[in-house]
Image (cartoon, helix red, strand yellow):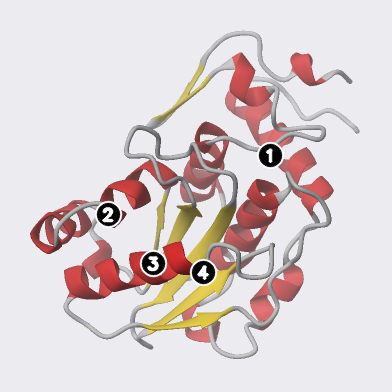
Amino acid sequence: MGEEALLYAPLSYHDVYLYPEDASLVLGAHWWNDQVIAFAFEWLKFQVPCPSPIVAIPAAACFLLLHSDAQTVREQLEQMQVHAASGLLLAVNDSPSLESAGGGTHWSLLAVALDQGSAWHVDSLGGANRRVAQALTRKLAAGLDRHLALRPAPAAPQQTNGYDCGACTVSAAQALWRCPVADWRPPLRCLQRAAGAQAMRREVAAWVRLAAGGTLEKE
């Protein structure tokens, strides 16, 4: 199956638009852009059962939080209804540009257990996004008016190339989404159930087909 078979026309899925050029990144040796990550987070939200109230925050919203003042952060979090959640999953991107939320070179995941006051940084490249995760955690703590202790995830899946960070991030997000937030504690065993990068690529490809009104294809 060629990658171009995934999508031939723009796909509108809830709050996300996915274009054929975005979908062409899902399979193969490609770095995922913010639209692919946003689509995957939206699919989790609407299609994957979740045992706890979790808010999944895609890259564009995370970028706004990172570059906003405390009052704006509080307002944005209220709009996202995070105060009714017990956990947050945030897509972290290392882009330094205010012009592009997903224009960096690396993705990672920030998982926040609100009741525990814990923030786990799940990074598939040995903590490459640590500074961004620290800054985002500080913004969240100020916006939520609570202390958040940031820790590196002890069981973070590690990529073996320069382009699988997005697939690893979505895989970790799905594993945590399916896990009660009360279990987001050391050693974070939920991550042991995370799919490998290639398996995650195939799974997201299946989501794209289904969202486009198609059927699952055997790989």
Q: CB of mark 3 within 8 Å of CB of mark 1? A: no
**In this rendering, which labeled residue sits more in front, label 4 or label 2?**
4
Q: Which corner quadrant holds the C terminus?
A: top right
* Residue at mark 2: 65
Question: Residue under circle 3?
Answer: 53
| Residue 46 located left or right of residue 114 | right
Outermost residue, left side: 71
Tag 3: residue type? Pro
Counting residues from the start of the chain, the first of labels 3 and 4 encountered is 3
- 4 over 210 or under it: above or below: above
- Residue at 65% in and 89% down: 187
* Rendering coords of residue 104 (x, y %): 52, 42
Q: Residue under circle 4?
A: 130
Query: What is the spatial separation of the Cα atoms under label 1 and label 2, in whole angstroms?
Result: 26 Å
Say which amino acid is labelled 2.
Leu
Q: Mark 1: which secondary structure?
A: helix
Gap between marks 3 and 2 measured at Cα: 21 Å
Q: In the figure, residue 37 lies in which quadrant?
A: top right
Disc 1/disc 4 C-alpha distance (Å): 26 Å
Residue under label 1? 204
Q: Amino acid at mark 1?
A: Val
> Where is residue 148 shown, x and y percent of the image?
33, 82
Distance, label 4 to label 2, CA atoms, is 16 Å
From this viewpoint, is residue 49 visible? no
> How many angstroms separate mark 3 from mark 1 (CA)?
23 Å
Is tag 3's residue or tag 1's residue first in the polypeptide sequence?
3
Q: Earlier in the sequence, mark 1 or mark 2?
A: 2
